[in-house]
Amino acid sequence: VNLLALEEFKDLNERHAEYQAQLEDLRKSRESLQRAIYRLDRTAARRFERTFETIKGHFHHMFRRLFGGGEADLRLVENEEGERGIEIEAKPPGKRTQSIALLSGGERALTSTALLFALYRTKPSPFCLLDELDAPLDDANTDRFMRILKEFNTQTQFILITHNKHSMEMADSLYGITMERSGISKVVSV
């Protein structure tokens, strides 16, 4: 006969009750977290859809302004793994609708710029750095691009790295790098 069995049973029973309470606490916490995650996912999805529709509308407008007409569309797509993405379709004036990958370099640059400006119209940023964005553009497209850039210049400061003469002519400030002597660079401003 184990005389300590009753005492051991009480200790084990207390520990068991404590573990049961902790387990119940964990179950409640998990359910609470799952509800919070579900609410956050629903809220994020609603906000994303609203923002996406706003950007899509701005993209249509900016595309038509940059191309002087035409149509463009943003669509949400889902692949086999369930991952979502965005597909850009563009129809410059006088062409048929096609994926952005099938456009010329200048058309791709303008379409990407339209998307960038649509994003900035939705949520402006204090500054933006554009590196050779106007390189594939002809003079007429560069002029349209620079006019729109000037409009956005009231809320965003743009730093444009360029070799394009038309872009340089329309800049408020111009900084250049020159090398008067081999290996020694000098900043020149206008």
Image (cartoon, rainbow, N blue to C red):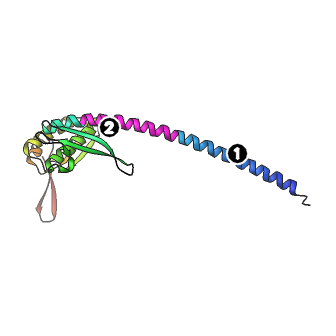
The residue where tag 2 is placed is: 52
Using the rendered view, name the quadrant where residue 66 is placed. top left
Q: Outermost residue toward the bottom?
A: 182
Report the predominant secondary structure element of the magenta stretch: helix
Q: Disc 2 marks which amino acid?
A: Phe
Residue 67 among magenta residues: no
Q: Dividing the image into 4 quarters, which one contains the N terminus? A: bottom right
**Which residue shows up at 37% across the image and 49% down it?**
83
- On the image, the x and y values in percent for residue 110 come to 17, 44
| Sequence-wise first label, 2 or 1 | 1
Side (left or right) of 109 relative to 42: left
Identify which residue, 163 or 57, lies in the foreground.
57
Q: Position of residue 185 (x, y in %)?
A: 16, 60
Q: Which residue is mark 1?
A: 21
Residues shaded magenta: 36-58
Q: Amino acid at mark 1?
A: Ala
Q: Residues within 10 Å of mark 2 (few under 14, many from 20)?
A: some
